[in-house]
Image: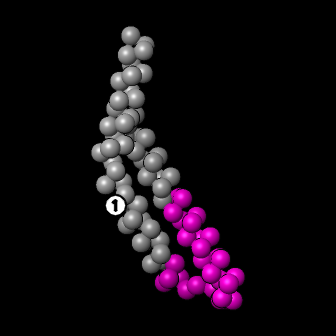
Amino acid sequence: MWLRMEMATIEESVLTLSLCLMVWLQNARRRALGDAGQSMVEYAIVVALVAIIAMAGVQAFGQGVQQVFQQLLSKIQSIGS
């Protein structure tokens, strides 16, 4: 259960970081080009792409992250014994 909670936290962190980066890049582009603003469709596409990339990253690295947390958990449990 603890490991699943950690994976959800990692997924949320990756998604939050990706969204912050996209907003920062959009703001930089707007300042550089003098755009008045993005349309909602473009924002929806960007959010969907970031979500897909985040899910693919978790799928690709999920097993490796799970193994790291399992090793950490077993070391912590062995210290307590």
Sort mark 1 into few (<14), some (14-19) or many (20+) by Cα contacts within 10 Å: few
User: Which region is colored magenta?
Assistant: 16-43
Quarter of the picture containing the C terminus is top left
> Is 34 rendered above or below residue 51?
below
The percent position of residue 3, horizontal first and vertical second, equals 37, 37
Please name the amino acid that badge 1 sits on. Ala
Looking at the rendered image, the quarter that the N terminus falls into is top left
Q: Residue at x 42, y 21 (%)?
A: 76
Residue where numbered disc 1 is placed: 56
**Image-based side of 22 in relation to 36, left or right:** left
Would residue 1 be visible to someone looking at this image? no
Q: Pick whichever, 8 or 28, lies toward us.
A: 28
The residue at 38%/35% (across/down) is 69
Q: Seen in the image, is 45 located left or right of residue 27?
A: left
- The answer to whether residue 36 is magenta is yes
Q: Which residue lies furthest to the top in this view?
A: 81
| 77 or 32, nearer to the observer | 32
Residue 22 can be seen in this image: yes
The answer to whether residue 30 is left or right of residue 78 is right
